[in-house]
Image: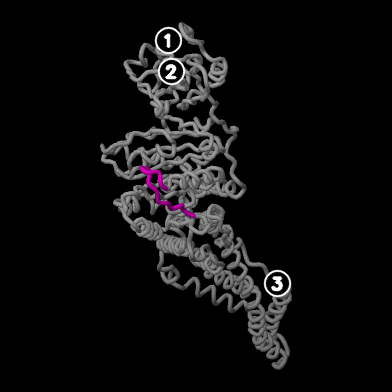
Amino acid sequence: MTAVTDQDHTEHADRAGENGGAGGERSAEGASTEGTSGEGTTEGGASGGGGSDRGAHEEPDGSKSGNGRTQKADGSEKGRHARVERDSAGTGARADAGRIDSASAEAADAWDDGLIARRVSEEDGGGERVPVAEVRGHSALPSGPLVYDGRLRSRLEALRELVGLSRTRLDSRTLAEAGRVLDEAAARRRLSGQHTVVAIAGATGSGKSQLFNALAGVPISETGVRRPTTAAPIACSWSDGGATLIERLGIPPRLRRRPLQNPEAEAQLRGLVLVDLPDHDSAAVQHREQVDRVLALVDAVIWVVDPEKYADAVLHERYLRPMAGHSEVMFVVLNQTDRLPGDATHQVLDDLRRLLDEDGIALGEYGEPGATVLALSALTGEGVGELREALGQFVAERGAPARRISADLDAAADGLRPVYATRRRTGLSEEARDEFAARLADAVGASAAGEAAERAWLRNANRACGTPWLRLWRWYQDRSQPVTGRLSLRTPEDAEATARQRVEQAVRTLADRASTGLPAPWAQAVREAAVRGSQGLPEALDELAARAGLPPGRPPRPGWWPAAVLIQACMTLLQVVGGLWLLGQIIGFMAPNLGVPVLLMLAGIVGGPIVEWSCRMAARGPARRYGTEAERRLREAAAGCGRAWVLDPVAAELLRYREVREQYGRVTGVVTSPR
């Protein structure tokens, strides 16, 4: 019994009422099939798939069945001649001779799938035998899209957010696998959730096509000694509704088959779509490319190995080891056990399990999730039933598509681990922020500005509370001092260059501390954000320093300054009065009395410096507070400028990293604490 392609679907409606004669010879010229037996002749239509008719199969009792038609003739009917013609519209057939059973015609009308090769059903009974075509509709599963559970949906959504947040920070090659998983998950979700696509993969000579045919119950995939035998993927579906899944694999209709109709097998494997792949170690590059492409799309895979190549390095290093996380959707079958003598099968099977364990593949031997390892012989059929039973239970669970997507998520997350995960605490500490602000304050001269403000306050106090003679003396010193002695040795350009260097050094130090412990892409993003901010930071600091520096005019005076000024004026007045009194006595204008004018002069001369010293002592505290306040304002201005230009962009990058780290934890299923 052979299977026909999906292209035969359009012809089965035309052939619903055809019955041909029995014969023993078939020719396939063009698209027609003729069968002769004795004096009978049957003409049939062409079957799809390259113009060859695979719809006929020789039954053991000599009868022929093809494309859902069954005809059997005994010795009493050898003189009967039947001819079937289709009309031009392809809507029916007329029988020139013979008779057609009404029940057979009704069954043929009901059969409209046209996708499965049918077996002849022979009814035993007395009397004249008539040709009967037993036709049964192929099982169809209720159509419905695949539904992911809440945890898998959450992980997919987290991966989507992760990719979106990382597009501007990571290159497209790094995110390519994650994007592919999202695309495939969305595409698979829109398709049938009642079907499971399983691929049979193996090396040359492993017998995977033979196993494919054994599971289908009909020779679908070509087998032979020529290598490679399978040149393109072939699909076989046990129920309707999986056409979109097969189209997703890129398998054309001419390579789509249906298994041998068997109610027990159909019930057991209902919902299975089996795909026979080319050899993964084929010498043809396009064969290997097809294997890699289809393996990325199927829900599960059956790896077929033989006693000679089960330890092949290509199989383990290129496929099994990278797919170790997909063990729950993986079958590993040791084929051709009929070639092994005695207990050699158990020894090879144990060694195969050891190699799989070294590859990191979990083995589900005691009920735990993992790969299923079996030994069988597709040639003799030993162990095929066990595989069919395990495969039927696997398909009946309807969980393979979701488990495949989950395993793909795990693989994608593992590949992204170097660019998201870190074991070190990341971010900027308060100490690093304070140090950065202090460096910027030093760059703009906050300490020097505070000291200058303090000196200005003291000078203002000295001008208000000092003796006139001392102020006159300082004025004279200022006028007599050379100009060169008052100029700074550093030019404004040198000071500006020094300040810029300090700012750049502060930014580099901050960027190094912020990027410490981060994965390379995010560390680079943090450094770039800091460098971008530092480009306009010196100019902004200069502008803020000018606005936040010393206010124009004289420093403010405390409330006691008018009293001190009045007392100092009184001391000066005493000196003047005592001096004039003594002068009047010298010139004889006044009566001689040295005691009082001398005391007045001494009180003024001693009291003036005492008042000045007292005011200076009292002014130290306010002057220091004034200088500290000026330094504080400048430091705050520098810190605010540094925060706006450097710290905020760096903090934004660190916050983005924490967000993607959190999303990465959701993808992996591990909740990470914020760092």
Residue type, numbered disc 1: Arg
Q: CA distance from mark 2 to mark 1?
A: 9 Å
Residue in view at x 44 percent, y 20 percent: 72
2 or 1: tag closer to the N-terminus: 2
Q: Would you place residue 605 above or below residue 488 in this image? A: below
Q: Which mark is residue 558?
A: 3
Q: Where is residue 606 shown, x and y percent of the image?
A: 65, 87
Q: Nearer the viewer, mark 3 or mark 2?
A: 2
Residue 80 is labelled as 1
Furthest residue toward front: 126
Percent x, y of residue 214: 41, 39
Does residue 319 belong to the magenta stretch?
no
Q: Does the magenta stretch mainly form a helix, a strand or a loop? A: loop
| Camera-nearest residue between 675 and 550 | 675
- Give left or right: position of 469 versus 289: right
Q: Which residues are magenta?
A: 370-382
Amino acid carrying mark 2 in the image: Ala
Observer-nearest of 224 and 73 = 73
